[in-house]
Amino acid sequence: MSMTDIDQPEPAPSTDDTREQPQASAPPKRRRTAADLALIAVFAALIAVCALLPAISVGGLVPITLQTFAVLLAGAVLGARRGFLAVLLYLAVGAIGLPAFSGGAAGIAPFMGPSAGYLIAFPLAAALCGFIVERLPRKSIATSIPLIFLAGFASSIVFIHTLGPLGMALFGGLEIPQAFAADLAFYPGDIIKNILMAIVATAVHRAFPTLLPVREKARTH
């Protein structure tokens, strides 16, 4: 009887095993965080490259660049939060003095010039585009170019084509109606860039179907 009484407490070490189980989930979380940071950095660099490509002058205060293509692509591919952070990182890199803005501009001056409204609108447009794309049916994201196009173009209208003209009016010496009239010159190019963005984003999601973050509601179902 005394021997069995002594042997009974031995199952206690199993509690140590259960304590160690949460530690096993830490490395995947760290890997996801590292992957998120890498994606944010890559898309910030992509936006900078698109900004530095030769711009097209339309005779106004602000030229046409490929920035909006990369900005909305960041939102459509990475989702709202990471897309917003990617564009914010791009703006921060340019603000600290690296020539990341259109024409190689850098520093605070672009935020007080005619293009200031567009720069401020970029992270908001990326976030809205990502917000919409995240809520599309997962099967549609990889197959429906029109839905992603509409997400990007709607985001452009809400933020870029609103704050952009207001920036031209505030810092470019234009009346508000004149600024919005001047902004109309960007619409044809934005339609083309959003079509290209939707094609690229659809291809990326087809190749990497788990790239977008999973929403909380989706996890519960």
Image (cartoon, helix red, strand yellow):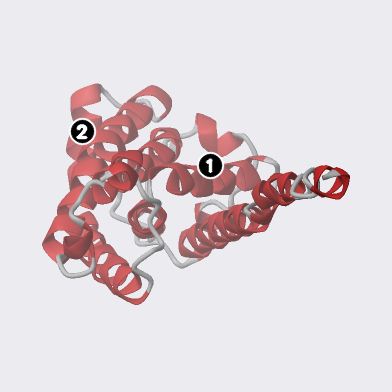
Nearer to me, 107 or 7: 7
User: Residue, x 44% and y 48% (percent of image)?
Assistant: 83
**In the rendered view of the protein, which quadrant contains the N terminus?**
top right
Res. 206 image quadrant: bottom left
**Residue identified by numbered label 1:** 88
Dots 1, 2 in contact, CB < 8 A:
no
Q: Nearest to the eye among marks 1 and 2: give it.
A: 1
Can residue 198 be seen here? Answer: yes
- Give the CA distance from mark 1 to mark 2: 25 Å
Q: Amino acid at mark 2?
A: Phe
Q: Quadrant of residue 121?
A: top left
Q: Residue furthest front?
A: 1
Return the residue nearer the eye: 97 or 136.
136
**Which residue is drawn at the image coordinates 56% and 62% (left, top)?**
42
Task: Specify few, some or many for label 1: CA neighbours under 10 Å numbering under 14, 14-19, or 20 or more.
Answer: many
At x 32% / y 68%, what residue is drawn?
205
Q: Position of residue 214 (x, y in %)?
A: 37, 50
The answer to whether residue 188 is visible is no
Please name the residue that numbered disc 2 is placed on: 180
Determine which quarter of the picture holds residue 114: top left
Helix, strand or loop for disc 2: helix
Q: Position of residue 135 (x, y in %)?
A: 23, 46
> Where residue 19 is drawn, which disc sits there?
none
Side of 156 relative to 26 (left or right) = left
Q: Is residue 69 above or below residue 12?
A: below
Q: Is residue 176 above or below residue 192?
A: above
Q: Position of residue 174 (x, y in %)?
A: 30, 27
Left or right: 33, with 196 as reference point:
right
Please provide percent x and percent y for residue 87.
Answer: 49, 47
What element does badge 1 sit on?
helix
Which amino acid is tagged 1? Answer: Leu
